[in-house]
Image (cartoon, rainbow, N blue to C red):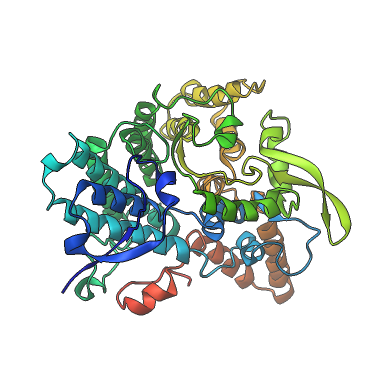
Amino acid sequence: MKKILIVFSIIIGFTNCQLVDVLEQDPMYELDLENAITSPKMAELALNGAYSYLPSTSTNYLFAALSGSFMSGAMLRQDFVTSGNAIYYSERYLNTLSYSSFGDGEWSDDYNIIKNVNYLLTSLEGINDSEFEKGRKEEIVGECHFLVALAYFRLLRQFGEYWDESSNYGVLVRDEIPSVANAVKARTTVAKSYEEIFNHLEIALAQAPAYTTSTRASVQAAKALKAVVLFYQGKYSEAAVAADEAITSVNPLDPSYSNVFTNTETSKEVIFCRAFSTDEASDVSYLMEKASGASGLWGPTESYMNLIEGDPRKTLVTENKNVTYNGATYNVNTVKKIYRPNDGVPVIFLRTAELYLIKAEALARSNSSIADAWAPIKELRGRVGSTNLTEPATRDELMDEIFKEWWIEMAFENWHEWFAVQRFDRLLEMNQSLAEQLEDEQEKDEENNTASFVEAFMQKLETRKIYNIPTGEINANSICEQNPGY
């Protein structure tokens, strides 16, 4: 039986490997695997097909970049919108963790990356090394394994109990060409999920090309991702070392914080991102124009504004302005860092500032000195001219400053603030919608002389750390177990 591979139809010669160039081309079509990838040129096109599944449309951009902001309590729909949807229905559910299918698109996209890489790697075995420019076949293999490692890691963090290696709720490892015979498959453990990710990363570290652009996988991106994965695995001593090794002169901190977002594609601080083609940018910019542009329908919460008050990044991250809604004018705060007029700020997966924060928190959690753990935070704040550089006197103060820095430096990018409130156990402090819900549940318990309402609410917070496995997967895959609480 012939296997099918999805690839991109390209109408111009392949002279530039930039992702953005390929994304300008025609839609996908299907080819027989035996005949699809038989040359270096077709291998390059198929590789770009795999890259294309990184978030691109407006709704996928929302879920990839901003869902965690709503969930954590950093972003909200403006108060003047009192009914219906300002932009998209998720704005009414994410801040109360009342979701059941918001991760379906990301699940599909990440497994499409994995599937297409599996096809490509199989096909590469049939192409002689001599047909490629020297070393390029190895580089393609390295890029493939980086993309798979990133896809599995994203899946593990959003659908698996990534914080508990003893858990059985890991990812579905799809390491074969898809067929009817292997469609039904059980989830692997969290420990095995991490093992799978590191196996792919080791190949990427050995074979991926050197960094030339943030839109392509590189050995530098593999080093950075390794530090990130170790950090979320809870191996803090190893994560601190890996972060230090990944902080190099190739990707230094950008002297200008705002340049990271106004010129993401060229800022050396950005190690790996998903940039947009012209058509995609138009789609994303429509969403962000309504969210942070003239409409200003979404904005930072009071919790976020209180945290960033007094920091030089306040005017770089947020903007206070008047907006008009239904004929009335309102003065609101909007998120400036993710807004470029008539354009889309790329989805940033890895940047150097994150490595500084990982190093700081990993050192703090592995009992290094306060001075050593504080140094990366001091450098991040020094970059923007902050005067808040005094070394904390206690470990509690140190951890508080590291938490604040995660929110100030990294919010509204890629779920960083959501994972921070989980690690620091500050969700109810930062998410006022949930705090108000807890008060309601406490009142119910008092009225009924019980503790069951609060207990049920707190159990919901625990299970909503991660998304549900999409219904489509559960229906088609009878032995794929759903996450607890769904």
Q: Position of residue 337 (x, y in %)?
A: 63, 40
Q: Which residue sits furthest right?
A: 328
Which residue is more in the foreground, 36 or 88? 36
Q: Residue at the spot x=24%, y=39% of the render?
A: 139
Residue 198: in sight, yes or no?
A: no
Residue 29, percent from left and from top:
34, 65
Report x, y in % for residue 248: 39, 24
Q: Nearer the viewer, residue 28 or 303?
A: 28
Q: Residue at x 55, y 50 (%)?
A: 281
- The answer to whether residue 12 of the structure is visible from this angle is yes
Based on the displayed image, in which of its 4 quarters is residue 358 positioned? top left
Quadrant of the snapshot with the N terminus = bottom left
In this image, 328 relative to 302: left or right? right
Q: Indicate left or right for 184 with 279 as reference.
A: left
- Where in the figure is residue 406, as x and y percent of width and height? 56, 38
Q: Residue at x 72, y 62 (%)?
A: 86
Instruction: Check the image and report above or below for 138 versus 157.
Output: above
Q: Is residue 132 above or below residue 425?
A: above
Which residue is nearer to you in this view: 304 or 384?
Answer: 384
